[in-house]
């Protein structure tokens, strides 16, 4: 594949493997956190435009601060899950038993 400056990943390092095995439970947790962040963003966004849209009062500052604190906590959780997945993938890459995801299946069905 040709390299182009607009499509290169500036954070990519040659020593980092491109593929690895990770537990799906971590991916499910990250996906749930993503939906939670999107929901909180919608709540705060709707609150900001509430007076103009419906005339109702927006959320008070304490509530908005608490919601944004929740987003920060979810981001921290996503970071922990990402670190766990990277650690698992790196350990699996070094372990001979874990390195063969095909389970010695015949080449015709791989």
Image (spheres, helix red, strand yellow):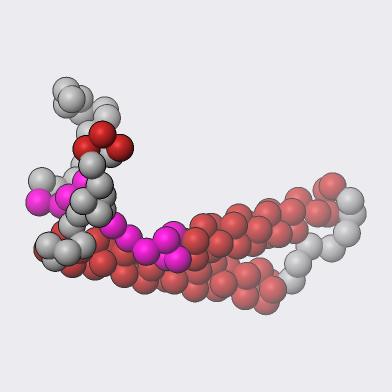
Relative depth, front residue between 69 and 75: 75
Quadrant the N terminus occupies: top left
Classify residue 48 as left or right of residue 72.
right
Q: How many marks?
A: 0
Classify residue 72 as left or right of residue 9.
right
Q: What is the magenta range?
A: 15-27
The residue sitting at 27% across, 30% down in the picture is 7
Q: Give the prevailing secondary structure in the magenta stretch.
A: loop
Q: Is residue 63 magenta?
A: no
Q: Is residue 23 magenta?
A: yes
The residue sitting at 31% across, 69% down in the picture is 84
**102 w.r.t. 57: above or below:** above
**30 w.r.t. 4: above or below:** below
Where, by quadrant of the figure, is residue 58 drawn?
Answer: bottom right
Classify residue 90 as left or right of residue 77.
left
The residue sitting at 36% across, 71% down in the picture is 80
Relative depth, front residue between 79 and 92: 92
Relative depth, front residue between 5 and 3: 3
- The picture places residue 59, in percent across and down from the top left corner, at 76, 67
The residue sitting at 42% across, 61% down in the picture is 24
- The picture places residue 110, in percent across and down from the top left corner, at 28, 39
Relative depth, front residue between 59 and 39: 39
**95 w.r.t. 41: above or below:** below
Is residue 31 something that shows in the picture?
yes
Is residue 37 something that shows in the picture?
no
Where, by quadrant of the figure, is residue 51 drawn?
Answer: bottom right
Classify residue 30 as left or right of residue 10.
right
């Amino acid at each position: 594949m040709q390299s182009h400056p607009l499509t290169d990943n500036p954070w990519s390092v040659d020593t980092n493997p491109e593929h690895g095995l990770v537990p799906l439970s971590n991916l499910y947790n990250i996906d749930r956190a993503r939906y939670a962040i999107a929901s909180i963003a919608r709540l705060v966004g709707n609150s900001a435009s509430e007076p103009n849209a419906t005339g109702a009062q927006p959320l008070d500052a304490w509530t908005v601060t608490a919601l944004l604190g929740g987003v920060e906590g979810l981001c921290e959780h996503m970071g922990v899950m990402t670190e766990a997945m990277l650690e698992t993938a790196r350990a699996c890459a070094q372990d001979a038993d874990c390195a063969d995801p095909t389970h010695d299946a015949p080449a015709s069905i791989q």
